[in-house]
Amino acid sequence: MTPQQTEKANVILQHAQRYQAGRLTIFLGAAPGVGKTYAMLVRAHELHRQGVDVVVGYVETHARHDTEQLLAGLTVLPRICLGDQRRQLQDMDLDAVLARKPAVVLVDEFAHQNISGSRHQKRWQDINELLDAGIDVFTTMNIQHLESLNDVVYQITGIRVQETVPDRVFERIRDIRLIDLPVNELLERLNQGKVYVPEQAQQALNGFFKTANLSALRELAIQTVASHVDHNVRESFVLQGKAPIPLHQHMLVLLDQHSDAEALLRAACRIAESRVAIWTVVAFSHQATALTQNSFQLARQLGAMTEVLYGQQHVQLVYDYAMQHGISTLIMAQPAKTGLRRYWQQNTLSELLKLQPRFEVSLVTVAVKPIPLPVRHLSSVMLSLQETGLLLLVTAFSIVFASLGEQFLAIREISVIFITAVVFIASKTRMTVAVIAAILLFLAYDFLFIPPKFTFQIAAYTGVMTIVAFLAAALIASRLASRLREQVNALTAANRDQSILRDLTEKLSRAVHLQQVLEIADACLTQHLSAQVWLHVPQQSNIGQTLSEKEQISAEWTLKNQQPSGRFTQTLSQSVWWFLPCLASKQCVGVVGLQFSAEQHTLAEQQKRLSEAMVEHIAQAISRTLLSQELEAAKINAETEKLRSALLSSVSHDLRSPLAAMIGAADTLTHYRHAMNPQDQADLLSAIRVEGERLDRYIQNLLDMTRLGHDGLTLKRDWIGVDELVGSAVRRLKRYLPQVRIEIDLPEPAPSLWVHAALIEQAIFNVLENAAKFSPEDQAVELKVQCLPNQQIQIAIYDRGQGIPEAERERIFDMFYTMQRGDRGQQGTGLGLSIVKAIIGAHMGQIWATAGHHQQGTCIIMSLLIAPAA
């Protein structure tokens, strides 16, 4: 597939996904008061007159008379009241809208922060759920609420907007309508009190509503709409195949601990949107702090992918990642003019350029808010109680050991002992502790062992060189040891996660049933995540503790919408559980709930990735077992249908034959018995009896097969002689086949069996009957009983027919399998030997077919235990 074809396929897929769900229309303005809500209501009335089902979910009129009049004639859904007893607030009733399911719903203020206790924290999340339910949504928004423009708006107005909407939501837009108003006209409306009440209007004029601010915001709104229109035009051209569209560019954004990550991410988002590029944000493993996690969360809200790079060769890691993933542009923060940040970033940039990258490197200037040094580095400089204890203990031990070595062992290079102590501390702790240890041990070495002792003065130049060399060696050793420790920790963490996933995969691969998968998942998640686990698969019993009603609602929402909810999310975040959907082949096969300890207020990025990866493996295993169950059910249905067809065929053919003979003989006797002699009448009556007995045997076989296949069958065993079983079966056969000859060979004395007498007699009878059917009339059927050494009885029945081909000897025990052999072959239901196999199997015995004497005929052998095993 060519790149152009791939691009067209991607566009078609995006276009189809956008129009399969509900469609979003945004009425966008540069500032409050331009008439967004008014325009939305006017459009709603137009659709209402056309017969479209339009309802008002939430519209804020701000006491504007013209806007309130437009609500007349439209269906307005009641709002829901939330809050506590002291304060009740009204908000949109999301469940009422979903239950009503109109064609179009009006939801004002796209960036609104929902009331505490709502299902979602943000209104744009409510709108996403409405769109997923197939409901078209009209909404309003000002340009300053777009997340990627947050810094730009701050620089323009000096006001930090708190309520923002992630840019990725714009992917769902069907139509964007710019509601524009010249700046002078907007200010006139503000002065006339059509936007705010007089007190608020004067405050707005002195702050946000300045001519320069409004002009700049108006320009941003126009650019945003123009960018969206341009994207739609290019999509249309791709769909029509009129002009080739270049492939999406892939941008890589590198975070570092010295830059304003939020400003860098928002700037990168704007660049990615202008270039229609996908983008990924990366950070190094040693930066996995709460600040980095917040940056990753913001990046995902802006539509980026996130990745953590493990290792110490940072420049090489970034270069290798860029080359492996086809990165077209690397975005970094521009080096600062002074400070540590300038040194680190310039060094990173220069080392990267030495590798001669084949991708573009862009430097972005970001506005950094200066943070006081004590506040910024207090947590990194402060030592924990454990670190302080280790530092003091190692220092004291080094001083004692050096003193003893100098006094009793005449050790001259005392510095080696202190350097070793520094390396030891660096290998056990972090770099900050290692540096403090190097300085502390340096001072101890100077004070106690460099002449003049017990002072910090140095008498000779050689002593100065020694002490300087010691300090340099200690710092270098501590740095190398700390880097090695960080690298080992990073590799250990990565290997630990891979080991956990490998162990989970191996255990899940051995699970056959769904219950086994759920039990393995419960055990592994509990063990490796140190959390309480709740598992739910539709139409299956849950695993884990009982959830409250609020938590049940969150879990059901996750199952329905295939998105995480609960703790650590912005949906139903009041829950103490974190619910993750088990997604397999774009279907939600279950929900996993995790409850971490109450002291854990945030979820580390590595722990979050491990949890999601484990849930993904569990989802695949659940999907596999569900598919196996479906295939097994389909197989059983196919076998049932096959059995039903065979049974109907048997009933329609084999059971109708004796009925037809009986009816024919009875009709003959009814109409012509006066013209028939007694012998002919006797022959007809004998035929009726023989065919009736034949029909009775067929029906009895069907009943026996049904009874043997029932799970509740119990064997009523008793001791009975094998000679009695054989004699009874032979007498039954002689009653309707008097011409058959049977040769019996029994041991002396005849043994007894602990069996169900009636069933074993039926088995012997069926095999004898089968042998009599296929033996020539002048040949006898042989029945031979042998006692085997292992407390078994073997009953062999030989016929003198043509025999059974070796390939068919196993199939003769299948239900409804029949075959013709010789002139005496007869049609039957094919249940006789199948019933025998079921009877012998119920007695824990075996049955098989072999060739007869001298490879002539067939021998059916039944093997039974004399007494059941203890």
Image: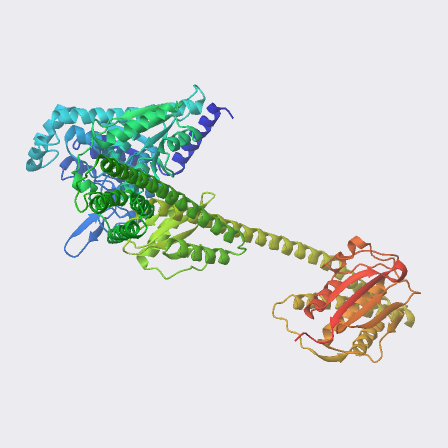
Residue 72, quarter of the rendered image: top left
- Residue 203 location, x and y as percent? 8, 34
Residue 151 in sight: yes
Residue 45 in sight: no
Q: Nearer the viewer, residue 17 or 206?
A: 206
- Residue 397 location, x and y as percent? 28, 53
- Residue 347 location, x and y as percent? 30, 28
> In the image, is residue 862 above or below residue 613?
below
Q: Nearer the viewer, residue 36 or 547?
A: 547
> In the image, is residue 66 above or below residue 522?
above
> In the image, is residue 47 above or below residue 718?
above
Residue 724, quarter of the rendered image: bottom right
Q: Is residue 335 left or right of residue 825?
A: left
Across the whole image, how many numbered discs are drawn on residues?
A: 0
- What's the image's color scheme? rainbow
Q: Where does the C terminus fall, quadrant-wise? A: bottom right
Q: Residue furthest right?
A: 778
The residue at the point 42 percent across, 33 percent down is: 16
Q: Nearer the viewer, residue 39 or 343?
A: 343
- Residue 337 location, x and y as percent? 21, 26
Q: Is residue 533 left or right of residue 567?
A: right
> In the image, is residue 670 above or below residue 405?
below
The residue at the point 35 percent across, 50 percent down is: 557
Q: Is residue 352 left or right of residue 392?
A: right
Residue 278, quarter of the rendered image: top left
